[in-house]
């Protein structure tokens, strides 16, 4: 299983995939509050699908906007930290 954080034109989408098939997804309009909302929504997605963080093998960020935007940097830091933590366990 993996989670993809997709950011496109003021829309953030969390996609839960298993074997390249979408299991679930959730999206919202990005209103410059990603730092407050992203972890909460990832947790909600996991709970909704009765999963734990260790069930997720990888988290990725896909975006069509520049990495100079804080939104993209926040998403990438969350994904890198998540992946690092899961590999350490």
Image (tube, rainbow, N blue to C red):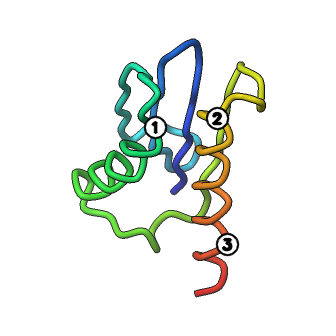
Q: Which residue is mark 1?
A: 34
Image coords of residue 26 (percent x, y): 35, 32
Q: CA distance from mark 2 to mark 3?
A: 21 Å
At 36% from the left and 38% from the top, the residue drawn is 24
Q: CA distance from mark 1 to mark 3?
A: 21 Å
**Pointer 1 with pointer 2, Cβ within 8 A:** yes
**Chain-order first, disc 1 or disc 2:** 1
**Residue 86 falls in image quadrant:** bottom right
**Chain-order first, disc 2 or disc 3:** 2
Q: Is residue 79 above or below residue 36?
A: below
Specify few, some or many for label 3: CA neighbours under 10 Å numbering under 14, 14-19, or 20 or more.
few
Camera-side residue of 1 and 72: 72
**Residue 68 falls in image quadrant:** top right
**Residue 38 falls in image quadrant:** top left
The mark closer to the camera, 2 or 3, is 2
- Find numbered disc 3 in the image and state the secondary structure of the residue it sits on: helix
The mark closer to the camera, 1 or 3, is 1
- The label on residue 84 is 3
At 65% from the left and 40% from the top, the residue drawn is 61
Q: Which residue is mark 2?
A: 70
At 52% from the left and 48% from the top, the residue drawn is 3
- Find numbered disc 2 in the image and state the secondary structure of the residue it sits on: helix
Specify few, some or many for label 1: CA neighbours under 10 Å numbering under 14, 14-19, or 20 or more.
some
Image coords of residue 69 (percent x, y): 69, 28
**Pointer 2 with pointer 3, Cβ within 8 A:** no
- Find numbered disc 1 in the image and state the secondary structure of the residue it sits on: helix
Residue lying at the far top of the rendered structure:
9
């Amino acid at each position: 299983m993996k989670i993809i954080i997709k950011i496109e034109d003021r829309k953030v989408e969390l996609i839960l995939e298993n074997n390249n098939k979408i299991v679930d997804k959730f999206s919202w309009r990005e209103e410059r509050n990603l730092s407050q909302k992203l972890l909460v929504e990832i947790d909600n997605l996991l709970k909704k699908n009765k999963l734990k963080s260790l069930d997720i093998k990888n988290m990725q960020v896909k975006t069509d906007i520049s990495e100079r935007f804080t939104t993209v940097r926040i998403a990438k830091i969350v994904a890198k930290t998540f992946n690092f933590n899961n590999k350490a366990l």
